[in-house]
Image: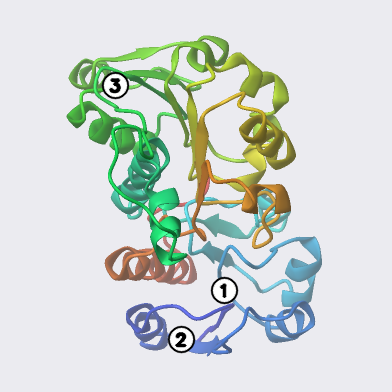
Protein backbone atom coordinates (compact mmCIF):
# COMPACT_ATOMS: atom_id res chain seq x y z
CA UNK A 1 0.00 0.00 0.00
CA UNK A 2 1.39 3.39 -1.05
CA UNK A 3 1.17 6.69 0.82
CA UNK A 4 -0.74 9.59 -0.74
CA UNK A 5 -0.45 13.11 0.68
CA UNK A 6 -3.30 15.54 -0.07
CA UNK A 7 -2.16 19.12 0.48
CA UNK A 8 -5.58 20.64 1.25
CA UNK A 9 -9.25 19.93 1.78
CA UNK A 10 -10.92 18.24 -1.20
CA UNK A 11 -14.37 16.60 -1.61
CA UNK A 12 -14.91 13.33 0.24
CA UNK A 13 -15.60 11.41 -2.99
CA UNK A 14 -11.96 11.81 -4.02
CA UNK A 15 -10.59 10.97 -0.57
CA UNK A 16 -12.68 7.80 -0.47
CA UNK A 17 -11.33 6.68 -3.86
CA UNK A 18 -7.77 7.17 -2.66
CA UNK A 19 -8.37 5.44 0.68
CA UNK A 20 -9.86 2.41 -1.04
CA UNK A 21 -6.39 1.58 -2.36
CA UNK A 22 -3.82 3.47 -0.32
CA UNK A 23 -2.94 5.19 2.94
CA UNK A 24 -4.00 8.83 2.77
CA UNK A 25 -2.60 11.78 4.73
CA UNK A 26 -4.96 14.69 3.97
CA UNK A 27 -4.56 18.18 5.38
CA UNK A 28 -7.84 19.21 7.02
CA UNK A 29 -6.97 22.62 8.44
CA UNK A 30 -9.27 25.59 7.75
CA UNK A 31 -6.35 27.54 6.28
CA UNK A 32 -3.85 26.51 3.60
CA UNK A 33 -1.09 24.28 4.87
CA UNK A 34 2.10 26.09 5.91
CA UNK A 35 5.27 25.50 3.93
CA UNK A 36 7.22 23.84 6.74
CA UNK A 37 4.32 21.55 7.60
CA UNK A 38 3.93 20.65 3.93
CA UNK A 39 7.61 19.77 3.58
CA UNK A 40 7.34 17.59 6.67
CA UNK A 41 4.22 15.76 5.55
CA UNK A 42 5.36 14.91 2.03
CA UNK A 43 8.39 12.99 3.29
CA UNK A 44 8.00 9.41 2.11
CA UNK A 45 4.96 10.11 -0.09
CA UNK A 46 4.43 7.98 -3.19
CA UNK A 47 1.93 10.47 -4.64
CA UNK A 48 0.93 14.07 -3.89
CA UNK A 49 -2.51 15.46 -4.66
CA UNK A 50 -1.87 19.21 -4.72
CA UNK A 51 -3.95 22.36 -4.76
CA UNK A 52 -2.95 25.46 -6.71
CA UNK A 53 -2.15 27.21 -3.42
CA UNK A 54 0.86 24.94 -2.88
CA UNK A 55 4.20 25.42 -4.67
CA UNK A 56 5.49 22.10 -5.96
CA UNK A 57 9.14 22.82 -6.64
CA UNK A 58 12.52 21.08 -6.42
CA UNK A 59 12.73 21.69 -2.67
CA UNK A 60 9.42 19.93 -2.07
CA UNK A 61 10.21 17.07 -4.47
CA UNK A 62 13.51 16.50 -2.67
CA UNK A 63 11.72 16.56 0.69
CA UNK A 64 9.30 13.89 -0.58
CA UNK A 65 12.09 11.55 -1.59
CA UNK A 66 13.03 9.36 -4.55
CA UNK A 67 9.99 7.07 -4.20
CA UNK A 68 7.59 9.87 -5.27
CA UNK A 69 5.85 8.85 -8.49
CA UNK A 70 3.03 11.33 -9.07
CA UNK A 71 1.95 14.92 -8.49
CA UNK A 72 -1.76 15.28 -9.27
CA UNK A 73 -2.85 18.92 -9.35
CA UNK A 74 -6.51 19.69 -8.60
CA UNK A 75 -6.62 22.44 -11.23
CA UNK A 76 -6.33 22.85 -14.96
CA UNK A 77 -3.57 25.43 -14.55
CA UNK A 78 -0.26 24.16 -13.24
CA UNK A 79 1.93 27.22 -12.84
CA UNK A 80 2.35 26.17 -9.19
CA UNK A 81 4.23 23.04 -10.34
CA UNK A 82 7.81 22.93 -11.60
CA UNK A 83 7.03 20.42 -14.34
CA UNK A 84 10.65 20.11 -15.60
CA UNK A 85 11.75 19.32 -12.04
CA UNK A 86 9.14 16.57 -11.90
CA UNK A 87 10.15 15.21 -15.29
CA UNK A 88 13.83 15.20 -14.36
CA UNK A 89 13.03 13.00 -11.37
CA UNK A 90 10.76 10.64 -13.29
CA UNK A 91 7.66 12.00 -11.53
CA UNK A 92 4.41 12.17 -13.53
CA UNK A 93 2.59 15.49 -13.16
CA UNK A 94 -1.11 15.73 -14.01
CA UNK A 95 -3.88 18.35 -14.07
CA UNK A 96 -7.67 18.42 -14.44
CA UNK A 97 -8.66 19.87 -17.82
CA UNK A 98 -12.14 19.60 -19.26
CA UNK A 99 -14.18 19.12 -16.09
CA UNK A 100 -14.19 22.83 -15.20
CA UNK A 101 -14.77 24.20 -18.70
CA UNK A 102 -18.46 25.09 -18.44
CA UNK A 103 -18.27 26.45 -14.87
CA UNK A 104 -15.39 28.77 -15.74
CA UNK A 105 -17.06 29.92 -18.94
CA UNK A 106 -20.16 30.74 -16.87
CA UNK A 107 -18.06 32.97 -14.60
CA UNK A 108 -16.35 34.60 -17.59
CA UNK A 109 -19.66 35.49 -19.17
CA UNK A 110 -21.09 36.51 -15.81
CA UNK A 111 -18.22 38.98 -15.47
CA UNK A 112 -18.86 40.24 -18.98
CA UNK A 113 -22.47 40.98 -18.07
CA UNK A 114 -21.56 42.51 -14.71
CA UNK A 115 -18.94 44.78 -16.25
CA UNK A 116 -20.89 45.90 -19.31
CA UNK A 117 -24.19 46.41 -17.46
CA UNK A 118 -22.61 47.90 -14.29
CA UNK A 119 -24.34 45.38 -12.05
CA UNK A 120 -21.72 45.57 -9.32
CA UNK A 121 -22.08 49.34 -9.14
CA UNK A 122 -25.83 49.03 -8.87
CA UNK A 123 -25.70 46.49 -6.06
CA UNK A 124 -23.13 48.51 -4.11
CA UNK A 125 -25.30 51.61 -4.42
CA UNK A 126 -28.33 49.85 -2.96
CA UNK A 127 -26.40 48.10 -0.19
CA UNK A 128 -24.85 51.42 0.80
CA UNK A 129 -28.33 52.86 1.31
CA UNK A 130 -27.82 55.61 -1.24
CA UNK A 131 -30.83 57.44 -2.60
CA UNK A 132 -31.72 56.55 -6.19
CA UNK A 133 -34.57 56.54 -8.67
CA UNK A 134 -35.08 55.33 -12.20
CA UNK A 135 -33.94 57.71 -14.90
CA UNK A 136 -33.14 57.61 -18.62
CA UNK A 137 -29.43 58.07 -17.97
CA UNK A 138 -29.11 56.25 -14.64
CA UNK A 139 -26.22 53.72 -14.60
CA UNK A 140 -26.21 53.31 -18.36
CA UNK A 141 -24.13 50.36 -19.51
CA UNK A 142 -23.27 48.82 -22.85
CA UNK A 143 -25.24 46.21 -24.82
CA UNK A 144 -23.56 43.10 -26.24
CA UNK A 145 -25.67 42.45 -29.32
CA UNK A 146 -23.68 43.16 -32.49
CA UNK A 147 -20.48 43.72 -30.53
CA UNK A 148 -17.23 41.76 -30.89
CA UNK A 149 -15.77 39.38 -28.32
CA UNK A 150 -12.04 38.81 -28.56
CA UNK A 151 -10.96 35.50 -27.01
CA UNK A 152 -7.29 35.20 -26.09
CA UNK A 153 -6.62 31.47 -25.86
CA UNK A 154 -9.23 29.45 -27.76
CA UNK A 155 -9.05 26.19 -25.83
CA UNK A 156 -12.04 24.51 -24.23
CA UNK A 157 -12.91 27.37 -21.88
CA UNK A 158 -12.37 29.99 -24.56
CA UNK A 159 -14.64 28.10 -26.94
CA UNK A 160 -17.31 27.65 -24.24
CA UNK A 161 -17.22 31.39 -23.54
CA UNK A 162 -17.49 32.10 -27.27
CA UNK A 163 -20.59 29.87 -27.49
CA UNK A 164 -22.25 31.94 -24.80
CA UNK A 165 -21.28 35.15 -26.58
CA UNK A 166 -22.71 33.90 -29.87
CA UNK A 167 -26.01 33.21 -28.12
CA UNK A 168 -26.01 36.89 -27.08
CA UNK A 169 -25.54 37.98 -30.70
CA UNK A 170 -21.83 38.78 -30.52
CA UNK A 171 -19.23 38.35 -33.26
CA UNK A 172 -16.16 36.30 -32.33
CA UNK A 173 -12.48 36.82 -33.06
CA UNK A 174 -9.75 34.83 -31.36
CA UNK A 175 -6.01 34.62 -30.91
CA UNK A 176 -4.50 31.22 -30.25
CA UNK A 177 -1.33 29.26 -30.95
CA UNK A 178 -3.14 27.17 -33.53
CA UNK A 179 -6.33 27.13 -35.56
CA UNK A 180 -9.34 25.59 -33.87
CA UNK A 181 -11.37 22.83 -35.53
CA UNK A 182 -12.86 24.33 -38.74
CA UNK A 183 -16.29 22.94 -37.86
CA UNK A 184 -16.21 24.72 -34.48
CA UNK A 185 -14.95 27.92 -36.10
CA UNK A 186 -17.82 27.76 -38.59
CA UNK A 187 -20.36 27.06 -35.85
CA UNK A 188 -19.16 30.08 -33.86
CA UNK A 189 -18.45 32.27 -36.86
CA UNK A 190 -15.04 32.77 -35.24
CA UNK A 191 -12.14 34.36 -37.07
CA UNK A 192 -8.52 33.89 -36.03
CA UNK A 193 -6.46 37.09 -35.80
CA UNK A 194 -3.22 38.16 -34.19
CA UNK A 195 -3.25 39.76 -30.76
CA UNK A 196 -2.72 43.29 -32.06
CA UNK A 197 -5.79 43.10 -34.29
CA UNK A 198 -7.86 41.43 -31.60
CA UNK A 199 -7.16 44.24 -29.16
CA UNK A 200 -8.13 46.95 -31.63
CA UNK A 201 -11.38 45.43 -32.92
CA UNK A 202 -12.85 43.85 -29.77
CA UNK A 203 -15.52 45.39 -27.57
CA UNK A 204 -14.85 42.76 -24.91
CA UNK A 205 -11.50 40.97 -24.47
CA UNK A 206 -11.69 37.71 -22.50
CA UNK A 207 -8.48 35.98 -21.40
CA UNK A 208 -8.29 32.18 -21.42
CA UNK A 209 -4.64 31.48 -22.20
CA UNK A 210 -2.33 29.48 -19.92
CA UNK A 211 0.13 31.36 -17.74
CA UNK A 212 3.87 31.11 -18.26
CA UNK A 213 6.89 33.21 -19.14
CA UNK A 214 5.44 33.95 -22.59
CA UNK A 215 2.16 35.29 -21.17
CA UNK A 216 3.44 37.15 -18.10
CA UNK A 217 1.96 40.67 -18.36
CA UNK A 218 0.64 39.80 -21.82
CA UNK A 219 -1.81 42.64 -21.19
CA UNK A 220 0.06 45.72 -20.04
CA UNK A 221 -0.08 49.46 -20.63
CA UNK A 222 0.73 49.17 -24.34
CA UNK A 223 -1.96 46.57 -24.99
CA UNK A 224 -4.57 48.45 -22.96
CA UNK A 225 -3.81 51.61 -24.92
CA UNK A 226 -4.43 49.70 -28.16
CA UNK A 227 -8.01 48.91 -27.10
CA UNK A 228 -10.96 51.17 -27.76
CA UNK A 229 -11.98 53.41 -24.88
CA UNK A 230 -15.30 51.52 -24.84
CA UNK A 231 -13.68 48.08 -24.43
CA UNK A 232 -14.02 45.81 -21.40
CA UNK A 233 -11.35 43.34 -20.24
CA UNK A 234 -12.22 40.07 -18.47
CA UNK A 235 -9.69 37.70 -16.89
CA UNK A 236 -10.61 34.23 -15.62
CA UNK A 237 -7.27 32.63 -16.55
CA UNK A 238 -4.38 33.58 -14.26
CA UNK A 239 -3.75 36.90 -12.57
CA UNK A 240 -0.18 37.66 -13.74
CA UNK A 241 -1.29 37.61 -17.38
CA UNK A 242 -2.45 41.17 -16.66
CA UNK A 243 -0.26 43.96 -15.28
CA UNK A 244 -2.63 45.04 -12.50
CA UNK A 245 -0.95 48.41 -11.95
CA UNK A 246 -1.30 49.22 -15.64
CA UNK A 247 -4.92 48.04 -15.61
CA UNK A 248 -5.76 50.19 -12.60
CA UNK A 249 -4.29 53.22 -14.35
CA UNK A 250 -6.17 52.45 -17.57
CA UNK A 251 -9.48 52.10 -15.73
CA UNK A 252 -8.88 55.27 -13.72
CA UNK A 253 -7.93 57.33 -16.76
CA UNK A 254 -10.67 56.05 -19.08
CA UNK A 255 -8.29 54.22 -21.42
CA UNK A 256 -10.78 51.33 -21.36
CA UNK A 257 -14.37 51.29 -20.11
CA UNK A 258 -14.23 48.56 -17.50
CA UNK A 259 -13.00 45.16 -16.38
CA UNK A 260 -14.05 41.97 -14.64
CA UNK A 261 -11.48 39.92 -12.73
CA UNK A 262 -11.73 36.49 -11.14
CA UNK A 263 -7.96 36.10 -10.70
CA UNK A 264 -5.25 38.43 -9.44
CA UNK A 265 -1.56 39.03 -9.95
CA UNK A 266 -0.60 38.53 -6.28
CA UNK A 267 -3.55 36.45 -5.14
CA UNK A 268 -5.21 36.75 -2.67
CA UNK A 269 -4.00 40.38 -2.53
CA UNK A 270 -5.62 42.76 -5.00
CA UNK A 271 -3.95 45.91 -6.26
CA UNK A 272 -5.25 48.62 -3.87
CA UNK A 273 -6.10 51.05 -6.67
CA UNK A 274 -8.51 48.50 -8.18
CA UNK A 275 -10.45 48.39 -4.92
CA UNK A 276 -11.23 52.09 -5.20
CA UNK A 277 -12.59 51.93 -8.75
CA UNK A 278 -16.27 51.53 -9.62
CA UNK A 279 -15.68 50.31 -13.19
CA UNK A 280 -14.12 46.97 -12.23
CA UNK A 281 -15.91 43.87 -10.96
CA UNK A 282 -13.81 41.77 -8.57
CA UNK A 283 -14.64 38.20 -7.52
CA UNK A 284 -12.40 35.83 -5.49
CA UNK A 285 -11.28 33.12 -7.95
CA UNK A 286 -14.70 31.47 -8.33
CA UNK A 287 -14.21 30.10 -11.86
CA UNK A 288 -14.65 26.44 -10.93
CA UNK A 289 -16.60 27.04 -7.72
CA UNK A 290 -19.60 24.76 -8.09
CA UNK A 291 -20.15 21.61 -6.03
CA UNK A 292 -20.31 19.50 -9.17
CA UNK A 293 -17.18 20.94 -10.75
CA UNK A 294 -14.94 20.91 -7.68
CA UNK A 295 -15.98 17.30 -7.00
CA UNK A 296 -15.21 16.29 -10.58
CA UNK A 297 -11.82 18.02 -10.39
CA UNK A 298 -10.86 16.25 -7.18
CA UNK A 299 -12.03 12.86 -8.43
CA UNK A 300 -10.07 13.29 -11.68
CA UNK A 301 -6.95 14.20 -9.67
CA UNK A 302 -7.46 11.08 -7.55
CA UNK A 303 -7.88 8.97 -10.69
CA UNK A 304 -4.64 10.42 -12.06
CA UNK A 305 -2.71 9.59 -8.89
CA UNK A 306 -4.19 6.09 -8.68
CA UNK A 307 -3.36 5.32 -12.31
CA UNK A 308 0.29 6.29 -11.86
CA UNK A 309 0.57 4.22 -8.69
CA UNK A 310 -0.82 1.22 -10.60
CA UNK A 311 1.79 1.71 -13.30
CA UNK A 312 -0.80 2.93 -15.80
CA UNK A 313 -0.98 6.06 -17.94
CA UNK A 314 -3.04 8.70 -16.09
CA UNK A 315 -6.15 10.15 -17.76
CA UNK A 316 -4.76 13.71 -18.01
CA UNK A 317 -0.97 13.99 -17.80
CA UNK A 318 0.58 17.42 -18.26
CA UNK A 319 2.15 17.66 -21.71
Q: Residues within 10 Å of mark 3 (few under 14, many from 20)?
A: few
Which of pointers 1 and 3 indicates the residue nearer the eye?
A: 3
Which of pointers 3 and 2 indicates the residue nearer the eye?
A: 3
Q: Residues within 10 Å of mark 2 (few under 14, many from 20)?
A: some
Q: Position of residue 28 (x, y in %)?
A: 54, 89
Secondary structure of residue under mark 2 = loop
Q: Position of residue 317 (x, y in %)?
A: 48, 51
Q: CA distance from mark 1 to mark 3?
A: 36 Å
Q: Position of residue 214 (x, y in %)?
A: 68, 30
Which residue position holds label 3? 181
- The residue drawn where x is 70% and y is 64% is 55
Q: Earlier in the sequence, mark 1 or mark 2?
A: 2
Q: Is residue 189 visible?
A: yes
Task: Identify the mark at residue 22; answer none if there is no mark.
Answer: 2
Which residue position holds label 1? 47
Q: Is residue 194 visible?
A: no
Horizontal side of 114 relative to 222 (left or right) equals left
Q: Position of residue 195 (x, y in %)?
A: 55, 16
- Asked if the residue at tag 3 contacts the one at tag 1, i.e. Cβ–Cβ closer than 8 Å, the answer is no
Secondary structure of residue under mark 3 = loop
Q: Quadrant of residue 16?
A: bottom left
Horizontal side of 23 relative to 302 (left or right) equals right
Q: Foreground residue, 188 or 20?
A: 188
Q: Earlier in the sequence, mark 3 or mark 2?
A: 2
Secondary structure of residue under mark 1 = strand
- The residue drawn where x is 68% and y is 56% is 86
Q: CA distance from mark 1 to mark 2?
A: 10 Å
- Asked if the residue at tag 2 contacts the one at tag 1, i.e. Cβ–Cβ closer than 8 Å, the answer is yes
Q: Residues within 10 Å of mark 1 (few under 14, many from 20)?
A: many
Q: Foreground residue, 80 or 234?
A: 234
Q: Earlier in the sequence, mark 1 or mark 3?
A: 1
Amino acid sequence: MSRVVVTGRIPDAAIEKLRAEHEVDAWQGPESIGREELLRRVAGADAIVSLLTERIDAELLDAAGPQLKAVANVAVGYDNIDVPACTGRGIVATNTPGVLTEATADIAFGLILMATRRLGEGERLIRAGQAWKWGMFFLLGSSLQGKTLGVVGMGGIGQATARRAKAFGMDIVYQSRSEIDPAIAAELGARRVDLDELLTVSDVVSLHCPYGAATHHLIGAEQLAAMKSSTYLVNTARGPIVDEAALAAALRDGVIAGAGLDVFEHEPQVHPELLDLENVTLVPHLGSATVETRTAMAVLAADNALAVLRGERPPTPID
